[in-house]
């Protein structure tokens, strides 16, 4: 199997996975089915998918405040998109399970020392020493526990009043409020509040409206560590179908999307909505074959393709993929990941340029307009922290990278950049 850690003790791994099989599910089959219904709407252009969160969740960055602030960013972006377009936003977090990362090389070198690559906190530590980089199966239990705690708080926040539209100004953050993007968000928040006051003045009791008081937030991560994913796969008592109960939506990465490979085989056997990342090497034959393997019955909302092609290549590479799938009779969701194809470096650190990110999204929209297909969503890596890992946007120069870089793996948008991108996407959707 591709991209699996070299676990040093197979017996210890087996013991851990037997234990995980006895643990309660993290999510439920009915929730995954409801997400699939929402995704089916987005595939037809009647909703828009915002899939966003950390590149890799951290065992160190784990607190109620951190979870709350990540949710704030997603809620802010969703309000901007909904207000600007009139479309409901399907909110899918890269959260409560994104603890494993694929790597281009199994090892990394630093100062003449070569050690196993960091594969996410579910596998090993990010510190560059031999003890930390040893894959440890016990980390899988900690990943489960942190995911469960995160989900517990997210459910409380999204249904317990925090996400109430009448508290829309409370979602802002200090360093966003002082920015031009924050001021534009504040203008939108005031308009929403005026609309709420108007509806209440007309006699609408918004305290009884779940759509105002609560939001649906779904979870997702890459189905990379197949032993762990299989251990959390359960048969639904209502339908008899198998669901991976580690998250509502699972995706197969660009490095593991071989149609005959183990990851695609696993994804074909679960009933969750599934997605596949498509990089520059993806061909028309690849995507049609993946449609046949993962969505043979052409179920609305079942399959998404998340394209990560790069701003300089998306105009040429995306049309043949879209055309081949359309002509073969499938209607998957097409979602743009403008992050992974636009990575460069500054002083040895991986960075992304905001202009490249925005250019890929704009070109993605243009291609779908030309092909007569639906640009169904975006897939973003972001953080609530005031970092500078993506550069080129206002107030985020390259010289800030050295002092404001915290990424475990890949560069993320900060809150200000995330809001700016949401405003730009809303304009694209309107046009």
Image (tube, grey):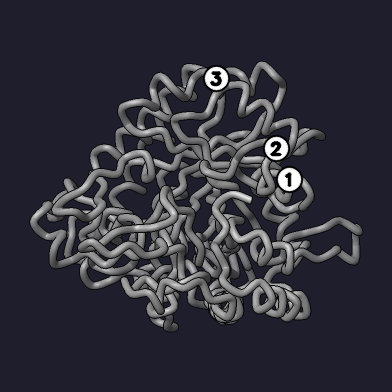
The image shows residue 403 at horizontal and vertical percentages of 13, 67
Quarter of the figure with residue 387? bottom left
Q: Is residue 148 visible?
A: no
Density class for disc 1 (Cα within 10 Å; few <14, some 14-19, many ≥20) is: some
Q: CA distance from mark 3 to mark 2?
A: 31 Å
The image shows residue 164 at horizontal and vertical percentages of 50, 71
Tell me the number on the disc at residue 265. 1
SS of the residue under disc 1: helix
Residue drawn at x 71%, y 74% is 14
Front in this rendered view, residue 72 or 357: 357
Tell me the number on the disc at residue 16. none
Q: Is residue 405 visible?
A: yes
Residue beneath label 3, please? 372
Density class for disc 3 (Cα within 10 Å; few <14, some 14-19, many ≥20) is: few
The quarter of the rendered structure image containing the C terminus is top left
Q: Which residue is situated farthest in the front direction here? A: 112
Residue drawn at x 61%, y 27% is 286
Q: CA distance from mark 1 to mark 2?
A: 7 Å
* Whether label 1 touches label 2, CB < 8 Å: yes
Q: Nearer the viewer, mark 3 or mark 1?
A: 1
Residue beneath label 2, please? 260
């Amino acid at each position: 199997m591709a991209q699996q850690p070299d676990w040093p003790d197979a017996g210890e791994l087996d013991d851990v996975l037997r234990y995980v099989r006895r643990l309660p599910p993290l999510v439920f089959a009915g929730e995954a089915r409801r997400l699939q219904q929402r995704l089916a709407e987005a595939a037809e252009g009647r909703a828009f998918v915002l899939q966003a969160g950390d590149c890799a969740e951290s065992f160190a960055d784990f607190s109620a405040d951190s979870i709350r602030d990540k949710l704030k960013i997603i809620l802010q972006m969703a309000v901007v998109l909904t207000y600007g377009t009139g479309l409901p936003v399907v909110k899918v977090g890269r959260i409560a399970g994104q603890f494993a990362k694929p790597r281009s090389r199994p090892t990394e070198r630093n100062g003449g020392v070569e050690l196993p690559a960091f594969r996410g906190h579910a596998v090993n530590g990010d510190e560059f020493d031999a003890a930390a980089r040893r894959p440890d199966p016990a980390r899988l239990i900690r990943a489960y526990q942190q995911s469960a705690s995160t989900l517990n708080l997210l459910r409380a926040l999204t249904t317990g009043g925090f996400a109430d539209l009448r508290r829309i100004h409370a979602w802002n953050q200090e360093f966003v409020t002082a920015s031009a993007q924050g001021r534009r968000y504040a203008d939108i928040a005031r308009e929403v509040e005026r609309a709420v006051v108007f509806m209440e003045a007309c006699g609408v009791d918004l305290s009884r409206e779940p759509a105002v008081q609560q939001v649906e937030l779904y979870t997702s991560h890459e189905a990379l560590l197949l032993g762990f994913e299989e251990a959390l796969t359960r048969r639904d008592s209502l339908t008899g179908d198998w669901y991976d109960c580690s998250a509502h939506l699972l995706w197969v990465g660009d490095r593991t999307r071989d149609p005959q490979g183990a990851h695609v085989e696993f994804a074909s056997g679960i009933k969750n909505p599934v997605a596949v990342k498509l990089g520059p090497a993806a061909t028309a034959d690849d995507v049609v074959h993946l449609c046949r393997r993962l969505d043979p019955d052409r179920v609305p909302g079942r399959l998404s393709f998340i394209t990560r092609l790069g701003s300089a290549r998306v105009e040429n590479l995306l049309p043949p993929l879209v055309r081949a799938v359309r002509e073969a009779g499938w209607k998957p969701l097409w979602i743009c990941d403008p992050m992974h194809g636009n990575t460069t470096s500054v002083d040895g650190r991986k960075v992304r340029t905001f202009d490249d990110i925005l250019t890929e999204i704009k070109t993605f929209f243009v291609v779908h307009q030309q092909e007569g297909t639906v640009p169904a969503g975006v897939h973003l890596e972001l953080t609530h922290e005031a970092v500078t890992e993506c550069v080129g946007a206002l107030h985020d120069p390259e010289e800030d990278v050295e002092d404001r870089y915290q990424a475990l793996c890949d560069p993320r948008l900060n809150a200000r950049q995330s809001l700016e991108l949401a405003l730009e996407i809303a304009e694209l959707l309107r046009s």
